[in-house]
Image (cartoon, rainbow, N blue to C red):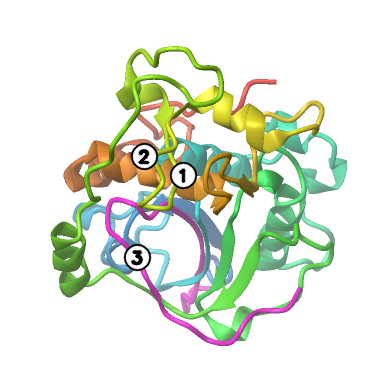
Amino acid sequence: MMPHDEDEAIAHKGHFYGVYLLCSQSLDSRYRGKCYVGFTVNPKRRIRQHNRGCDFGGAKKTSKKGPWQMVMIVHGFPNNIVALQFEWAWQQPTLSTRLKLFPDLKRKKPKETHFDYNFRILNRMLGVGPWHRLALTIRWLEADYERAFELPIPCHMEIVSGKVSITASQRKLEKASAAPPVAWAPECHLCMQRIDQPERSRLGCTNPTCRLTCHMLCLASYLLGDEPGQYIPITGDCPLCETRLSWSALLQRQHLLLGVPEELQDNKEEDLSEDGPDVDSDVEVQEFSD
């Protein structure tokens, strides 16, 4: 699958979760070509922080080793936790239980650049669960680095080129276009049981005129159909109005309805992810359990 035409993604702040790859453009041969993987909710701000140094919000591992270019970013994760788990596995392929299937990821190949090695890790990650079931977008940010994947990626993922913009006008638009009120039913339309703790366990259709009300697990099971051994749906049809649903879009809609403050997303970005789950990190991010 080759990249689509150039486009610029306008992201809703507080609803964008990306895992990016930096490459150093340093004149110092010790650092030039080195790579760094990180998580962000605002790519433009994050690359500025990396290039200004750790005193201005950048990571210790990138401070004074740049300038850095953000060459690609993977986004479309349903929440920050899933994105952080993806980031950790990309940083630590030899420790990830999901990537132990690929012993060739333990080290760089002879004459392989740091970028090529990280790109090879990403290619393997996109083909294994649970990530291969997410509606992710692989976005090239620097044309000089663009290339085709060696292994095919799932057909529901997109490869695009172009910057991500999170603008002041977009933030105002987001606030003005808050999610419309939803006429929820008190019971799940699939199991007909009352929904306890609806804020946490209730999902509905993305069609604003549809009154679908379901337990999250009931709807997931319905969308999975006869797929054995799977827990995360990709797409499916609404059981009421037959609108085509994306599981990622359903979770993002739930997030919007909950109204999680933007400040919390920014804090999670800087507190949880930038140095990874190693000795420099305050919080260890656990990978998906088997």
Element assignment for label 2:
helix
Residue at point 28%, 60% (across, down): 53
Q: Position of residue 223 (x, y in %)?
A: 65, 37
Residue 41 lies, with reference to residue 86, above or below; the image says below
Residue 238 image-quadrant placement: top right
Judging depth in this view, the residue of 277 and 170 nearest the camera is 170
Mark 3 surroundings within 10 Å by alpha-carbon count, few (fewer than 14), some (14 through 19), many (20 or more): some
Residue 267 lies, with reference to residue 1, above or below; the image says above
Q: Position of residue 30 (x, y in %)?
A: 55, 66
Helix, strand or loop for the magenta stretch, by majority: loop
* Disc 3 target residue: 11
135 part of magenta stretch: no
The mark closer to the camera, 3 or 2, is 2
Residue at point 42%, 64% (across, down): 65
Q: How far apart, in angstroms, are the residues tagged by discs 3 and 2?
A: 17 Å
Judging depth in this view, the residue of 3 and 114 nearest the camera is 3
* Disc 2 target residue: 254
Question: Hey, what amino acid is under mark 2?
Answer: Gln
Element assignment for label 3:
loop
Whether residue 256 is visible, yes or no, is: yes
Element assignment for label 1:
helix
State if disc 1 and disc 2 touch (CB < 8 Å): yes
* Quarter of the image that includes the N terminus: bottom right
- Magenta span of residues: 1-29
